[in-house]
Structures are given as structure tokens and as C-alpha cells.
Amino acid sequence: MKCIEIMFSRHAVQRMFERGIATKDVRAVIVGGKSIADYPDDKPLPSRLILGFVRNRPIHVVVAFDESNGWCNE
């Protein structure tokens, strides 16, 4: 997924903090992870679940892609 910008929700930031996941780790998963589920009916944007490994740690990221501006919402 090619994101021009990644916007992190408050919920995502809170969970990342609780789990010790850095923004660079989330970016790595979005860029290099494997899409394991699509949610085309999610609102306000369709989203997908991506699985990636950072330092042998599995990380799941749910991300929505806004085609109108190239931004990813996490």
C-alpha cells in the first residue's frame, strides 16, 4: 500500500503505546506486510487488516486508504 501520509487515530496511538509499538513499526507493516482481510463495507473508508513482522514480532494493523488524497488512516 502506498501511503503519502499516515494519520493515526487517538485509539491507535493509545494501543501502540500500551503495546510498545513505534510509528516506524506500523509504517513498516503497512509497506511490507501481507493483507490478510479486506473490509470493503467499513465506513467512512474501506479498510484492510495487514500482518507484518518487526524484529520477529507479529504486528496486525487495520488501515483505511483514502484514494482521493493518498492518505492512510490507522
Image: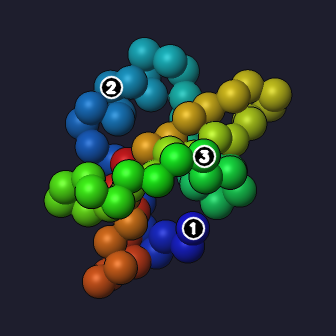
CA gap between label 3 and label 2 equals 23 Å
Q: Residue 14, percent across and down?
A: 32, 25
**Residue 24 in view:** no
Which numbered tag is attached to residue 14?
A: 2
56 or 20, nearer to the observer? 56
CA gap between label 1 and label 2 equals 23 Å
Please state which amino acid type lies under the numbered disc 2: Gln
- Disc 2 residue crowd, few under 14, some 14–19, many 20+, Cα 10 Å: few
Please state which amino acid type lies under the numbered disc 1: Met
Vertical side of 35 occupied by 71: above or below: below
The residue at which mark 3 appears reads as 36
62 or 11, nearer to the observer? 62
8 or 34, nearer to the observer? 34
Q: Quadrant of the N terminus?
A: bottom right
The residue drawn where x is 68% and y is 51% is 34
Q: Nearer the viewer, mark 1 or mark 2?
A: 1
Q: Residue furthest left?
A: 44
Q: Residue 66, percent across and down?
A: 32, 72
Q: Nearer the viewer, mark 3 or mark 2?
A: 3
Q: Residue 3, percent across and down?
A: 49, 70
